[in-house]
Image (tube, grey):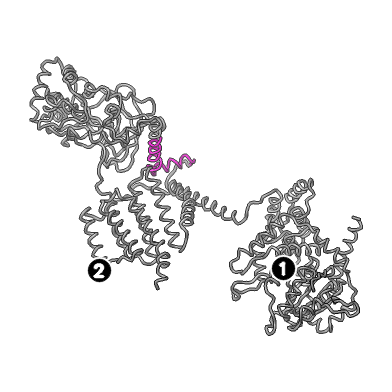
Amino acid sequence: MNAVGAHEADADAATLARALETLETVILGKPAQIRLCLACLLARGHLLIEDVPGVGKTTLAHALAHVLGLLWQRVQFTSDLLPADIIGVSIFDRASQRFNFRQGPVFTQLLLADEVNRASPRTQSALLEAMEERQVSADGTTYPLPEPFFVVATQNPHEQLGTFALPESQLDRFLMRVTLGYPDSAHERELLRGGERRELLSHVAPALSAAAVLRVQRAVRGVHVAEPLLDYAQALIARTRERSDLKLGLSPRAGQGLLRAAQAWAYLAARPAALPEDLQAVLPAVVAHRLERRDPAGGGDGDEVAREVIRAVPVPT
Amino acid sequence: MPAAAPSEVDRRLPPLAWACAAFAGGVLLNVDRVPPWASAVALFLIAWRLASERAGLRLPGTVARALLALALVAVVLLEFHTVNGLAAGTALLMVMSGLKLLETRARRDQFVMVGTGLSLLLAACLDRQSLARAPLYALEAWLACSALAVIASEGLEVRAALRLAGGALLIAMPLAVLLFLFFPRLPGAFWAIPRGAEATTGLSDTMSPGSIVKLVADYEPAFRVQFVSAAPAPEERYWRGPVLHDFDGHTWRRSSGAFHPRERLQYLGRPYRYRVALEPTHQRWWLALDTPAQSPASNVSLTYDNQLVAAEPVSEPVSFDAVSYLRTRSLEPLSASSRREDTARSRDNPAALALAQTLRQRAGSDAEFVTATLEYLHRGGFVYSLTPEPLGADAIDDFLFNTRTGFCGHYASAFVTLMRGAGIPAHVVTGYLGGEWNPVGGYFVVRQSDAHAWAEVWLEGRGWARIDPTAVVAPERLRRGLLDLLPDALTTRERLLRSSEWLTRLLQQWDAANAWWSDHVVRFDYPAQLDLLGRLGVRSPDVRYLGWAFMLALTLWLAIIAWHIGRAAHPAPPDALSRAYVRLCRKLARIAPARALHQGPLSYAETVRARRPDLALPVRELLERYAHLRYGRADAGAREESIEEFRRAVARLSLPAAAPVNISR
């Protein structure tokens, strides 16, 4: 069993490496972001991709779903979207004389929630409840969601009109927020020349499967976290709480997520134990959307704060 | 706005109150050095200013303040006839700063007040340097520094301010010690402060029948003596002070000032070597065991009557080494001028004169006459008392034939009068007798209450002979201290202190601490500094070496401070693995940028690789080993060995300095 497990783990690592390569051919010039997204999913976290339109948010989400070999659904969020449109509805079945619950798009392994901030708060919170509980309740019955279950949401930060910004409590449910940014000139040239990227996806085979993803998630949880690393993580978290220019420091949930993400990052680097470097690599993506400056004019976004925190806390020797 | 008023006062009062406290502390330290009115004025002005802040009392206007200032300067001038000198200067500073307080509004003014408090502290330090005051001075320094902290940062809590100031003072302490030890104390430099006329203490150069009794109630130490070898017996410890020659029938005085040659002496018996530490008296004489053989210092002369007289009054503690012999014999006859001086008689006291002549006629020789006179005092019903009846116009006659009660001064005075009545040269010697052994410090402390007076008589063929007429009346006085003899002379406090053994012991320890303080701290002067340098191994110490030592010690102190600050930023490595890792990073820092504090081992490996690709492999291997040992899963037993192996690998790691990097590539 053990030998078989080890063999499978090696195989999973190899497939993951392949998956990363595939993704990099689809999303050009963003290896760090791709790796972060993958780490987020492997750490059983939900992902928020935030950026201006047209930089490949949706393509990235598609690619992730495809490469991981998961069932996926896509919901385009609009202001008139209702909770039932996501969760599903109970329909009266004449034949059996009773209500049948028809599952909504949320019953999938990877839910792509496009422009999540366009929906009304009510709909948002229905989704977010599903994210946290990994189950939905309708008409007094609880329906578990499939395993694995991920939400990859995208949002456009600059669009103000007709959007409902996610409140802090709901942002906290996303393990990571990743921003893509514009490609550099060489990759942009390649993009312009290469045509539609999403079409590429149809040519590549899924690298993993749902079972493999679950296996890898278990393996990620097994990545060793030593006491000194916990010390370091605590020091980082404490630092965010000490800073007087922040509205709030990191929550314990954020701390847990930070460690899980670091484990996933270490796993992707094929390390049996998480290192301070792993924490540092995931820290900006994990904390940036949770840290808000008291004074918005104070300069620097969450990313910058995260980098300052890293610089301010010495790594244990 | 009435609502804002209380908070405004709350906000403004603490800094002002602290400034006032610092100033008041300085005033209180100087209370016994300035006339009472000066401290009273200063304290009153402080109270006024505080009351005005709290209760809105009106403060005087500009004109009133100017008039007040002029008036106060005038009063100081009236009191001292100068504004120069420590006491006058202190008084002036006190009252003028009090006035300044009335116009303090800004924070800057409050700083000035604290500065004044510190100046007053300095003034007190210049004058009063006893051990008992040291804690008071330290307290005032602490108070003033805390006041600075409160004024500088509004809303600082009292405890925080005290802690801050205390910590700062403690950090500064080593620097103070350095300055104390090594800052060159050149003699006669600018800090020789002109002193006003100071009240003298101890023996004076006159003696009237009642004068010594004032000293008897004074328990303060006059001086301390440490004998090199054995000390003489208590009844032989006569400490020679002013020798009095002139008598007007009531008061004895020093000589008229005419020149007298000093008779050569043959010193008999063994020499006694000892060290005396004098407390300041503002008098010119130094006290030595009777009879000193030579002058102990260049500015001190041994007079014709074997007294040590300095050129300057003793205004600070002084210590000196001396040699004395208990017995002497004169090798020369008494000079005519001395004989004239010491046989002079006043026209008063006729009965005493008659008695002297009668006794002399009956006696066969001068020596027998001395014995007969002592016998007369012994059997004549004389009583030793510190509270004798007052004497009439012919004081000696009144004492000899009427009151017959008195103490050493009376007996010495009467005895010398009788001797002179018979034409024998004689004079009164004042000084101290005995001294209390302090087992803690290993010295004798001689107190003002040990003051004594005796007589010296010239006996042909022998020279000056010490005769203590008190001894025949109250022989116990010689063996025991005066206070044991007459317990009524003690105040309640002193009786209490002497009542129990441990209190006595405590008192002795306190006295020993005082002696140490004035010996090693107050009297730490330029020669003592050079002596210290000599003990530190400097062969021919002088002021340059002192400067070097000071600079060296200062640098050392700053280095220690810097090291501590640096250490706070880099906490000490907790275990062997950390130590090895820190060592590795230090080694790597020689060939690559130092590891940033927030850099983990692997990212540092990248940093090193970027600078030295040729060393990337071995460095990375070591850093990965560290990462594994620190963050990896511990395999119980093997860990210790792996760490040791890692430590050795780090020690072995050699990093060639020059790397053959091909830049063009």
A120 left or right, relative to B347: right
Residue located beneath label 1 in the image = A286
Query: What x and y, as percent, mark residue B464?
Result: 22, 24
Q: Amino acid at mark 2?
A: Val
Image quarter of residue B476: top left
Residue located beneath label 2 in the image = B63
**CA distance for labels 1 and 2:** 71 Å
Query: Could you tell me which chain the residue with mark 1 belongs to?
Result: A
Residue B438 appearing in the image? yes
Q: Which residues are magenta?
A: B509-537
Residue at disc 1, secondary structure:
helix
Could you classify mark 2 by the number of other residues whose Cα lies within 10 Å: few (under 14), some (14-19), or many (20 or more)?
few
The quadrant in which the C terminus of chain A is found is bottom right
B336 left or right, relative to B317: left
Residue B331 appearing in the image? no
Q: Amino acid at mark 1?
A: Val
